[in-house]
Amino acid sequence: MQQPKKIPMRTCIGCREEKPKKEMLRIVKNAAGEIHLDFSGKTAGRGAYVCNSESCVKRVCKYKLLHKTFSQEVSEEVYKAIEEEFLGRG
């Protein structure tokens, strides 16, 4: 009998809940220290995940949670890109 396929789970930096990786947006910090959105989920580097909920996206942006996660300053453009991706705002 074959084991059911294991679903990779990740923790949202906004609400701290564990959810399936495919339902979340990954933000990655690469070796050069650049931070950007990772739509493939496979880009090399340190990743942080945000779930697909407006309250989590707003919390990440309001409290600048990526600063803490990546231990460095994160540009306002990254936060704007996250809001645009989820909330459709420019």
Image: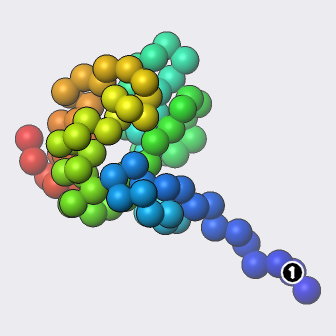
Q: Residue at x 40, y 49 (%)?
A: 13
Q: Residue at x 21, y 60 (%)?
A: 54
Q: Which residue is mark 1?
A: 2
Scheme of colours in the image:
rainbow
**Above or below: residue 52 compared with residue 28:** below
Q: Nearer the viewer, residue 7 or 65?
A: 65
Quarter of the figure with residue 60: top left
Task: Answer with left or right where residue 46 lies relative to residue 65.
Answer: right
Determine the residue located farthest toward the bottom in the rendered image: 1
Quarter of the figure with residue 23: bottom left
Q: Nearer the viewer, residue 63 or 37?
A: 63
User: Amino acid under label 1?
Assistant: Gln
Determine the residue located farthest toward the right in the rendered image: 1
Q: Tag 1's secondary structure?
A: loop
Residue 72, visible in the rendered structure: yes
Q: Residue at x 58, y 61 (%)?
A: 9
Specify the quadrant that holds the N terminus.
bottom right
**Above or below: residue 40 compared with residue 28:** below
Quarter of the figure with residue 39: top left
Q: Position of residue 49 (x, y in %)?
A: 44, 48
Q: Nearer the viewer, residue 50 or 39?
A: 50
Task: Answer with left or right where residue 48 lies relative to residue 59.
Answer: right
Residue 38, visible in the rendered structure: no
**Above or below: residue 21 compared with residue 28:** below
Q: Position of residue 86 (x, y in %)?
A: 23, 54
Q: Position of residue 30 (x, y in %)?
A: 51, 23
Query: Quick one: label 1, few (<14), some, or many (20+) residues within 10 Å?
Result: few
Q: Nearer the viewer, residue 62 or 21?
A: 62
Q: Residue at x 8, y 41 (%)?
A: 90
Q: Position of residue 20 (x, y in %)?
A: 52, 65
